[in-house]
Amino acid sequence: MDAVGPLSSDGLVQLLTHTGEAVENETFSPYAAHLSADDLRAFWRDMTVLRAFDLEATSLQRQGELGLWVQSLGQEGAQIGSGHALREPDFVFPSYREHGVALTRDVDLVDVLKIFRGLQHGAWNPKDHSFHLYTLVIGSHALHATGYAMALDRDGLVASGDPDRDGAAVCYFGDGATSQGDVSEALTFASVYNAPVVFFVQNNQFAISEPATRQSRVPLADRGKGFGIPTVRVDGNDVIACHAVTQWAVRHARSGGGPVFIEAFTYRMGAHTTSDDPSRYRSKAQESYWAERDPIARLETYLTARGELSDEFRAEVEAEAKALCERARTAVRSWEREPLLTMFDDVYALPHATVEAERAWFERYEASFADGETAAEGKAHR
């Protein structure tokens, strides 16, 4: 499928072809040279477990157990490969589809479901995982990531002379977010202040139902060039290449080299969310083409050909995925909605007069129903 502009394959870094054959890249192969067979099996394991969980979550939504689910189906290579390139001092700012990156940061995937069941805005402590809460406002977290990166620099945690202390911010978002003003502002600040931030764009070719060709006339990585930021385009379905490119990018940022813009060219195999119907805007032929470039099958073919994927290991991973899915089903069906008043908790770190006043009003409003007052009367007293 030859294409131009944002769907072009020109310049994509690739270390593993879609048929599972290793290829060399003069610049980036050295950044994957450290990967052992155990490392690659870990990549395969994580992608496989992630996909099983993703499909389970979709089923739970279809059964009415979740209000919504955002699939990462087809993007496992970009997320697992890049996620495994990060260290503890690095801090991740995800959008809402980065379940694979969450897995590599030791976030319990079952906890992620609390967000989509409408129980919590965030179900983990970002500090514990160096992984921020999901951001549903498209592109806004690019500014948060840039600000955090600038703070790392001012705190002396970049190019300090001690590589174990140095860190970078890594911001994940999709192709649609590159059209947002917040992302443009973040790129400006990151460039001007030489902030240690890696912008990792997963170009899955569709912003909801709007194709990337309606968003840009050039590869999305070129937007980084416009701000003077080094850019790389990588095959997002090649987990090894994504790992290598991210290794290079975070080292560049941590060492004081400034921001990097990575475009991982991939494909959203599922719907944008479970409220979307992708059959309305893409063809079966296109889906079949990208199914042949499945990131999991690609690595599986490579490992199998080298005798590095035993039946015993496959069975272990299958059992692990099955156990995770069973735990997810059991947990989701056991969760009960907390009292509505908890919505006022943790809005600010310290007590806030306006929030406390709203809490008091809502408490009186709820109590009014117990006293026999109607909802309309309660609203009239507001």
Image: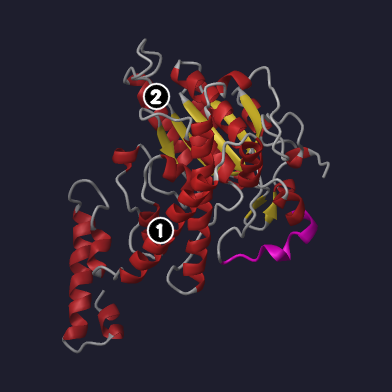
How many numbered marks, from 0 up?
A: 2
Instruction: Name the foreground residue: 375 vs 222.
Output: 222
Q: Is residue 282 left or right of residue 45?
A: right
Q: Is residue 221 above or below residue 48?
A: above
**For mark 2, what is the residue?**
167
Q: Secondary structure at mark 1?
A: helix
User: Identity of the amino acid at label 2?
Assistant: Gly
Whether residue 247 is visible, yes or no, is: yes
Where does residue 213 sit, x and y in percent of width and height?
74, 47
Cα–Cα gap, marks 2 and 1 = 34 Å
Where does residue 339 sit, x and y in percent of width and height?
23, 69
Queried whether the magenta region covers residue 365, the answer comes back as no
Instruction: Name the foreground residue: 249 vs 146.
Output: 249
Whether residue 185 is visible, yes or no, is: no
**For mark 1, what is the residue?**
323
Residue 215's label in the rendered image is: none
User: Identity of the amino acid at label 1?
Assistant: Ala
Residue at position x 36%, y 30% from top?
88
Q: Please report the bounds of the magenta region as a residue range.
A: 275-286
Residue at position x 48%, y 65% from top?
68
Q: Nearer the viewer, mark 2 or mark 1?
A: 1
Where does residue 122 sit, x and y in percent of width and height?
34, 53
